[in-house]
Amino acid sequence: MADGVWANAAADDRAEIKTWFDQWGAHVAAKEFTPARDLFATEALGFGTWMDYVEGLDALEARQWRSVWPTIQNFHHRTDDALQVTVSPDRLQAVGLVLWTSTGFDEDGQPFERPGRTTGVFTRTAIGAPWLCVHTHVSLARGVPQQSFGPQQA
């Protein structure tokens, strides 16, 4: 990595960002809001399907996560085949891009494929310290219905 130039991540940094996305994806799939918060900085910013702009982790959870996660199933970040990671020269900042899959539900409760993509911006205090996400942009793939209504209850 040249001085001052962001580059593809070293294997250990890439593995740590992969683990971060795997953990967050598991929390999304299980609708576990509280443990998901531990992966984010308090001052996190985000964009997403339901909010053009949210500032702060409380707002991100309340206005984005809680609007979407309960209405979908089978969320999974495709970290094995669709993850790109780049890191800053000092290895204290990183950007990860990953595709994901999920199942959405139309108004009648019928399932549909709901793929999309996430960009995450990460920081840490020192090499080896945990990565915290400071920004996410989560969006649906083109042509996917913008709203999922959740599965019909029996």
Image: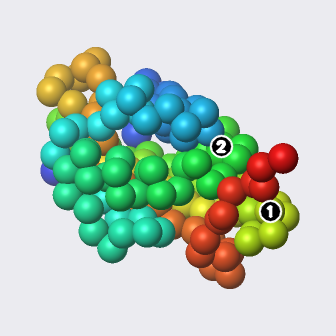
Report if residue 107 is visible in the image: yes
Q: Residue furthest top?
A: 128
User: Dot 1 lies on which element?
Assistant: loop
Nearest the eye: 66 or 88:
66
Residue at the spot of label 2? 76
Q: Residue furthest front?
A: 154
Looking at the picture, which amino acid does disc 2 mark?
His
The tag on residue 109 is 1
From the viewer's perspective, tell me whether residue 84 is left or right of residue 42: right
The tag on residue 72 is none
Q: Find residue 146 and report its image quarter.
A: bottom right
From the viewer's perspective, tell me whether residue 7 is left or right of residue 77: left
Residue at x 62%, y 39% (from the top left corner): 29
Give x and y (percent) for residue 140.
58, 68
Colouring scheme applied when the structure was drawn: rainbow
Q: How would you rate the neighbour count of disc 2 (Cα within 10 Å): few for under 14, some for 14-19, many for 20 or more?
A: many
Q: For the N terminus, which image quadrant? A: top left
Looking at the picture, which amino acid does disc 1 mark?
Gly
Residue at x 68%, y 75% (from the top left corner): 144
Foreground disc of the pair 1, 2: 1
Nearest the eye: 17 or 152:
152
Are discs 1 and 2 less than 8 Å apart at CB?
no
| 12 relative to 119, above or below | above
| Mark sitting earlier along the chain (1/2) | 2
